[in-house]
Image (cartoon, helix red, strand yellow):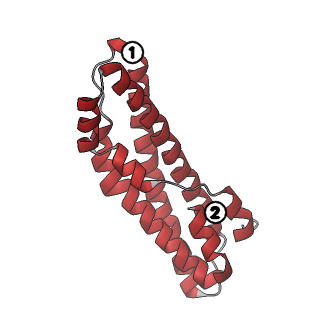
Amino acid sequence: MREAGFDEVIPFLAPTHLCAMLEWTDPKNESYLRSRNREPEFRAIQRRQLRLLIETTKRILRNSGLLQDLAAGQLYAENILLAKLAEELIEVGAKVRIYSLSVLMRLYWKKAVLALGPLAFSTQLADLEKTVSSSLVPTYQQLKSKIVDFTLLRSAGFVEQLIQNL
């Protein structure tokens, strides 16, 4: 297996908007939007937020896989600290991917329900709040922290580029 380099991985990383993701799944925000808009407008807003949530979650999923690939090349490095960080990075990346897939599955279900139009029963994006705010986002932030440590140890010159693309 050929080792992936930072210069090969960084261009494929996609920025994620974690604050927006938390806002879109906030029950207070959803209640506010529901109270300020008629049902058709509210459904349109929900569909837009749903598309953005799906895109952001896909980016998180893709980024974590790329970072795991980057770390995999260092699992058996002579530098024990680098090998340990690589292992931790892969482990946290696996958790992020599991949470991402769980969220994506629920988002696609909500998308199918919203597609029913006026026949659709009320669907709330806010019921994702717990999974997003207490599992996915904190674990992704932990992954970002680990990759910064990993990058500082391996190739410090790429830290700024990496942070901008995550």
Query: Mark 1 — residue?
Result: 117
In screen coordinates, is 68 left or right of 122? right
Q: Residue 49: x and y, percent?
A: 43, 37
Residue 34 against residue 57 in the figure, above or below: above
Q: Is residue 75 visible?
A: no
Q: Farthest residue toward the right? A: 2
Query: In the displayed image of the protein, which residue is found farthest to the front?
Result: 36
Q: Quadrant of residue 5?
A: bottom right
Residue 98, placed above or below residue 91: above
Vertical position of residue 72 compared to residue 21: above or below:
below
Which residue, as the protein is rendered here, is positioned at the far top?
119
Mark 2 crowdedness (10 Å alpha carbons): few <14, some 14-19, many ≥20: some
For the C terminus, the quadrant is: bottom right
* 154 vs 46: above or below: below
Judging by the rendered image, the residue that carries numbered circle 2 is 69
Residue 71 percent coordinates (x, y): 60, 70
Q: Classify residue 11 as left or right of residue 41.
A: right
Give the side of residue 124 with respect to residue 163, left or right. left
- For the question of whether residue 129 can be seen, the reply is yes
Q: Nearer the viewer, mark 1 or mark 2?
A: 1
Q: Name which residue type carries label 1.
A: Gly
Q: Position of residue 92 (x, y in %)?
A: 46, 64
**Viewer-closest of 1 and 131:** 131
Residue at image coords 76%, 66%: 2
- Is disc 2 placed on a helix, strand or loop? helix
CA–CA distance between discs 1 and 2?
Answer: 41 Å
Rate crowding at label 1 as few (under 14), some (14 to 19) or many (20 or more) other CA atoms within 10 Å.
Answer: few
Tag 1 secondary structure: helix
Q: Report the residue at 36% width, 43% height from top.
A: 24
Q: Please tell me which residue is depicted at 39% across the width and 36% down the height of the picture.
A: 106
> Dividing the picture into quarters, in which one does residue 104 lie?
top left
**Which quadrant of the rendered structure holds the N terminus?**
bottom right
